[in-house]
């Protein structure tokens, strides 16, 4: 039996547009997780950022998963499914047949049967993870894997753009709060010397 492609061009367009048209990272990631759960008819979706200092995954957004599941404990980058360090997708079509989960018993209690974990890249460096959870075993198609990898790159761009935008806004606000005397000092420095 051939693997079914779940990500159509229409789904891909909607998802990519939701990324491109948002300047608020938190809102965009929350909408994205909701869109993916609904469009792919899966149990849940989470997006994590890689904290290099702690070597852990930090949750940025999630939809469809319980608070109990999301608070099960720290997700170590080298133990939690493993794709972040290798930079490769990790597909667990049936968690009952895998030893790659950090918290397998919690996944079973949550009703998770399959996990697809995709790295999120920025400039060819893994900075996070897009994780999809299915309530039944899932033999994901190669085409869907490719689509999710491209989506991961788009998420990485959006994450870095939002971070840059926030930095620029903070810098602009700081300049606007400077006393007027600083503006006069800049004018004096800009005058040509006689």
Image: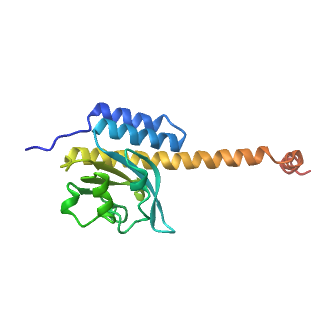
Q: Nearer the viewer, residue 64 or 154?
A: 64
- Picture coordinates of residue 74, whole percent (x, y): 44, 65
Whether residue 6 is visible: yes
Q: Is residue 160 above or below residue 83?
A: above
Q: Nearer the viewer, residue 158 or 192?
A: 158
The answer to whether 193 appears left or right of 53 in the picture is right
The answer to whether 25 appears left or right of 66 in the picture is right
Number of numbered labels in the structure image? 0
Which picture quadrant has residue 102?
A: bottom left
Whether residue 89 is visible: no
How are the residues colored? rainbow
The answer to whether 167 appears left or right of 59 in the picture is right
- Picture coordinates of residue 40, whole percent (x, y): 28, 39
- Picture coordinates of residue 118, whole percent (x, y): 33, 54
Q: Nearer the viewer, residue 185 or 39?
A: 39
Which picture quadrant has residue 2?
A: top left
Please tell me which residue is depicted at 49% across the width and 48% down the height of the picture. Answer: 159
Please tell me which residue is depicted at 30% across the width and 59% down the height of the picture. Answer: 88
Q: Nearer the viewer, residue 77 or 121?
A: 77
Please tell me which residue is depicted at 52% across the width and 44% down the height of the picture. Answer: 25
Please tell me which residue is depicted at 66% across the width and 44% down the height of the picture. Answer: 169
**Residue closest to the far top:** 10
**Residue closest to the far right:** 194
State the quadrant of the N terminus.
top left
- Picture coordinates of residue 145, whole percent (x, y): 26, 48
């Amino acid at each position: 039996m051939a693997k079914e492609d779940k990500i159509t061009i229409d789904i891909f367009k909607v998802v990519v547009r939701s990324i491109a048209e948002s300047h608020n990272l938190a809102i965009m990631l929350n909408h994205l997780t909701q869109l993916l759960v609904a469009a792919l008819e899966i149990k849940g979706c989470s997006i994590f950022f890689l904290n290099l200092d702690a070597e852990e995954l930090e949750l940025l957004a999630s939809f469809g998963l319980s608070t109990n599941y999301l608070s099960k404990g720290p997700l170590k980058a080298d133990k939690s499914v493993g794709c972040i360090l290798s930079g490769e997708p990790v597909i667990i079509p049936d968690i009952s047949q895998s030893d790659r989960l950090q918290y397998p018993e919690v996944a079973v209690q949550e009703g998770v049967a399959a996990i697809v974990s995709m790295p999120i890249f920025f400039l060819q460096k893994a900075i996070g993870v897009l994780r999809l959870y299915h309530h039944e075993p899932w033999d994901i198609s190669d085409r869907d894997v490719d689509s999710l990898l491209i989506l991961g790159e788009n998420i990485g761009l959006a994450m870095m753009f939002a971070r840059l935008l926030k930095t620029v806004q903070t810098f602009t606000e700081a300049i606007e709060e400077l006393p007027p005397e600083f503006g006069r000092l800049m004018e004096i420095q800009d005058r040509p010397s006689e």
